[in-house]
Amino acid sequence: MKIDELVRQMHPPRYTIAQAAPLVGKDVDTLRRWRREGVFVPQESRTFGALEVALYTDADIAEMRRIAVMLRPGRKPTRAPSGVFERLRNRRRFNA
């Protein structure tokens, strides 16, 4: 049985990154970059054999949708969700 099929059977629902990306309206590479850069890191993961899989909840999907709106080019949000912009600002200072 594939991991996506196992995850689909979980209650409450959980999503792999491949399942979450279209729900957020972003591609898998974007969600991977967000995770790597600390923009959004899912709180849950499961181990399937030797593979650890990040799992996204419905609340995670909703939060990532808000982040996607806030990160749209040309948009100046007044409030950043979950400290996203503080993390981005700190990362830019560190990388500069």
Image (cartoon, rainbow, N blue to C red):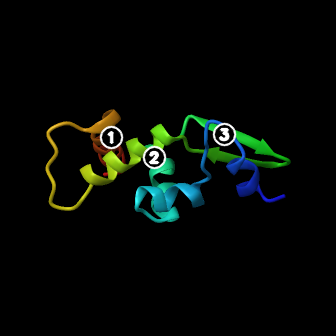
Work out whether residue 14 or residue 80 is closer to the camera in this orientation and state it: 14
SS at mark 2 in the image: helix
Residue shown at 46% from the left, 38% from the top: 59
Residue that carries the numbered disc 2 in the rendered image:
61
Earlier sequence position, callout 3 versus callout 2: 3
Is 40 positioned to the left or the right of 71 in the image?
right
Residue that carries the numbered disc 1 in the rendered image:
84
Name the amino acid type tagged 3: Ser
Work out whether residue 84 or residue 23 is closer to the camera in this orientation and state it: 23
Give the mark toward the camera: 2 or 1: 2
Is 56 positioned to the left or the right of 75 in the image?
right
Check the image and report above or below for 2 versus 39. Answer: below
Residue 66: image x %, image y %?
32, 46
Give the mark toward the camera: 3 or 2: 2
Residue 1: image x %, image y %?
84, 58
Q: Kindly indicate whether the residue at mark 1 contacts the one at mark 3 (C-beta within 8 angstroms).
A: no
Name the amino acid type tagged 2: Ile
SS at mark 1 in the image: helix
Give the mark toward the camera: 3 or 1: 3
Residue shown at 42% from the left, 56% from the top: 24
Q: Which mark is residue 72?
A: none
